[in-house]
Amino acid sequence: MTLQAPTTAAAPSAQPHLALEGVGKVFELRRNERIEAIKDVSFTMQENEVCVILGPSGCGKSTVLRMVAGLESPSAGQLLLDGNPIHGPGRERGMVFQSYTSFDWLTVQDNVEYGMRLNGAGARERRERAAEFIELVGLTKFANAYPRQLSGGMKQRVAIARTLANDPALLLMDEPFGALDAQTRWHMQELMMSVVESTRTSVLMVTHDIEEAIFLADRIEFMSRHPGSVLEEIKPAFKQGQRFTRKEQLLDFPEYGDLERHVMKLMRQQGGDEATPAEQGA
Ligand SMILES: Nc1ncnc2c1ncn2[C@@H]1O[C@H](COP(=O)(O)OP(=O)(O)OP(=O)(O)O)[C@@H](O)[C@H]1O
């Protein structure tokens, strides 16, 4: 077995790529009812960083991501991309959802070309650029297939290629592998790391999968239970700023297990579970 050499994540620069400053969101429901989804969420991320938002169900992870995407507006605080306030959706932010969002009536090639077509790219540029990203996600043989002819993992690869082909400054992913079986999910995580490395894309991703978060993240923003705020910022220090494209590379580090246990404990506490007697003594 040949181990791929790990690569190094970007060094921080003065102005953050993305900044959330005291962001809150209250949803107004009927009959004067309100839900405070998140409260005073603050964090920053740098360019070419993979930042993962992790936390228990309902803590507001998707709400944070949707606000960065400009699909929801904040009730308090502000969100800045490269220093500019986010006031709605924009081409510089591309979103990949958990559900498959490809157009069933278009081939893989046409799906990947679709956004570029809307942005006015010429036919040749579209064709070549789409082919490049289709190759990057390993679907060249399926360029002329329709989404219904693909497996779940392949459909999600189309969504990633389509989003990246628009050259977003920030890739937003909401549980992108949540609907996949364990093995496909694992392959997709590794594929994502290779793609992010070769495209130097900045990624903000939501997951509730601890293993996935530790494998992918340069930094984890762990959110407290509802209404969520950032409880702990976790840098997997044992990675020493390196990126890995094979999951088993992490298992070589004794610190990996320690970090997984720490995050599991946070998840139990914030998820409302009582700590087991063993954990109480830990
Ligand atoms: N459009 C909406 N209208 C009203 N309430 C909402 C809306 N979107 C989210 N909420 C509420 O905000 C809170 C946070 O929801 P959100 O989906 O952001 O959490 P999450 O951490 O992503 O959850 P999960 O991990 O289960 O997907 C929940 O109480 C939810 O009911």
Image (spheres, helix red, strand yellow):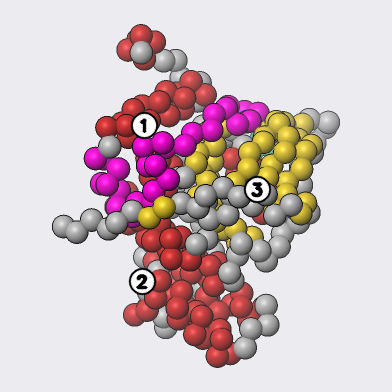
- Judge depth for marks 1 and 2 and give the one in front: 1
Under mark 3, the amino acid is: Ala
The reply to whether dot 1 and dot 2 touch (C-beta < 8 Å) is no
Furthest residue in direction left, as rendered:
1
Residue at 54% in and 29% down: 232
Visible residue check, residue 266:
yes
> Splitting the image into 4 quarters, where does residue 137 fall?
bottom left
Q: Is residue 77 left or right of residue 207?
A: right
Residue at 74% in and 52% down: 83
Under mark 2, the amino acid is: Gly
Quickly name the residue at label 2. 138
User: For residue 49, which numbered disc appears in the image?
Assistant: none
Quickly name the residue at label 3. 14
Q: Position of residue 3 (x, y in %)?
A: 23, 56
Q: Position of residue 274 (x, y in %)?
A: 44, 15
Separation (CA) of disc 3 from disc 1: 31 Å
Q: Is residue 188 left or right of residue 17?
A: left
Residue at 67% in and 66% down: 91
Under mark 1, the amino acid is: Glu
Visible residue check, residue 29:
no
Secondary structure of the residue carrying tag 3 is loop
Q: Where is residue 26 in the image (x, y as percent from the top left)?
A: 75, 35
Assess disc 3: are there few (<14), some (14-19) or many (≥20) residues with their C-alpha within 10 Å of its C-alpha. Answer: few
9 or 116: nearer the eye? 9
User: For residue 260, which numbered disc appears in the image?
Assistant: 1
Sequence-wise first label, 3 or 2: 3
Residue at 43% in and 75% down: 134
Identify the magenta region: 225-252
Q: Position of residue 279 (x, y in %)?
A: 36, 15
